[in-house]
Amino acid sequence: MKKWPAQLLIGTLCLCLALSGGTALGEEAQTAVSTVAPQTDEIMEDPAALAGEADMTAQSDYSAVRYTAVASTALKVRREPTADSAGNGSLDRNDVAYIIELGDEWSLVYTGRNVGYVLTKYLIDIKPYVYSSTGETDTASAAVAPAATSDASADSPDGFQEKFVAYAYKKVVARKEMDEKSAAVFRIPQYDEVTVSANQGGWSYIRYKNSYGYVPTDSLFKWDRIDPYAGDIPGCIKHMGLAFVNHSTDIRSYDDNGNEVLKTVNPGSALAVDTPDAQGRYPLPYWRTTGYVEESDIGYMMMVVPWEDAQSGDLISCMSTYYAVGIHTINYQGRNYNIYLGSSFISGTVVQPNETVNTYDLMGPYRYSTGYHRAPIMNPHALWGYGGGTCQVNTTLYNVLIQVPIFINWRKVHLEIGIYYCPVGFDAAVGGGDITMIFTNTLPYAIRINYFMSDGCLTVGIFRV
């Protein structure tokens, strides 16, 4: 194998220091440009993996490149051309990919850091890459690597990237370094808004009224993305799949004092579950605790497929919330009826790429004339209203949307204490005026929203169309 020219070696080191550019949706219908840093968990690998990566990179000099392309969306680079293969870095949207082998389904690419496989269908603007014996690219007929930029870290004022918005859960002191003993630089009052650029090691680098510093990540709540491709929202629950139970099934909690039945669900109920524990029990969030179902209770599993690998019909995210049944007052019967009615208005909705949806347009208005019953509501001026229960329909949908890169344009929470059926800060209220949720499908394909209803269990799944 020929040695790399010195110019290429320097260029490669510059590329490793470069931050990639990304597009972020702004407020409502506006569009803004934001720079998105690579996610740490997709770059840092174990020593054995790094050894393999070094071997692959050593084989990736530019003389092996045949084409260049642009990533149409954020892509995970995989070690083998299969959806379940381990990751080997990533490409952000609009990154240049250097194609070594162009395939119908998978292509072998060099990212400037790593070599691996990506799905060909997400590569656009494919052009021939011409390599000269001098080690320089013939720019007349080939795409050019992005120009190297300074290493502007996301946790410095100069490199600050507007990735998330969040709120102080309590009064919090911002520090100069990621250390509780570090010097205090400013204070944030309870419930004030901050902008977040980076999350690492339990700390968030934030901007508050043109001041910059670190705060503990768990001191913030009510997170939403400014850039839909910024990565996971801290505290967001992402489920393994839907478990369809084959008989009346007890959801149980387990602790040192034994176990108790939290809820009994009907045969055929769909429950969003996580990876089973050593005893073969599937955990799931039940209100603000953890419940479990046994493997023997499950008749069928529908697995979540990573959104970037999903094919038509695949499930890409899911969520379940639970509500009381067996309360026979007219108001609580009304709440359960409204949950069914509101879900039926949304279930089956297809949302095209870049389409914006206001859930009020699907479920509202919340009136007697549109079929809703009176039921308990969270309002300081009233104990009941028409449409009580539809907030749970909306909240469950919100928790499904944020598991994938879908942009939330607008939402409201139930005061600062939240609601019992989801973690604090992860609810989305509905009502009149601006009490609604608006979202935009920022995925590169259409999605379908489906609700799975059974008494006491409300489940939502998002599928690729």
Image (spheres, rainbow, N blue to C red):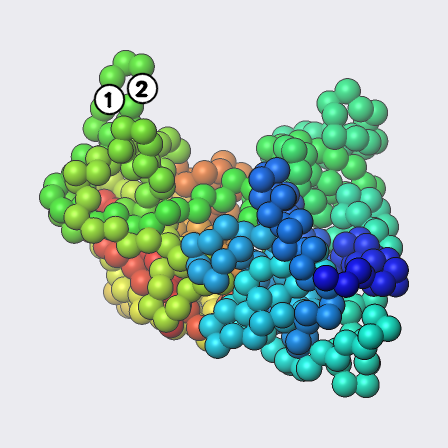
Residue reaching furthest top?
A: 257
Residue located beneath label 1 in the image: 259
Residue reaching furthest left?
A: 247
Q: How far is disc 1 from disc 2 in space, using C-alphas? A: 6 Å
Instruction: Report crowding for label 2: few under 14, some 14 to 19, many 20 or more residues within 10 A (C-alpha).
Output: few
Element carrying mark 2 = strand
State left or right for residue 459 relative to residue 13. left
Instruction: Report crowding for label 1: few under 14, some 14 to 19, many 20 or more residues within 10 A (C-alpha).
Output: few
| Label disc, if present, on residue 8 of the rendered structure | none
Kindly indicate whether the residue at mark 2 contacts the one at mark 1 (C-beta within 8 angstroms): yes
Residue in the image at 49% along x and 44% along y: 236
Q: Quadrant of residue 155?
A: top right
Residue in the image at 80% along x and 24% along y: 182
Q: Position of residue 433 (x, y in %)?
A: 50, 62
Q: Nearer the viewer, residue 52 or 230?
A: 52
Q: Nearer the viewer, residue 15 or 178?
A: 15
Residue in the image at 53% along x and 57% along y: 78
Q: Label 2 amino acid?
A: Asp
Q: Position of residue 444 (x, y in %)?
A: 52, 71
Element carrying mark 1 = strand
Q: Position of residue 276 (x, y in %)?
A: 32, 36
Q: Position of residue 42 (x, y in %)?
A: 60, 49
Q: Label 1 amino acid?
A: Asn
Residue located beneath label 2 in the image: 255
Pick the quarter of the image with the C terminus: bottom left
Residue in the image at 70% along x and 55% along y: 58
Residue reaching furthest bottom?
A: 140
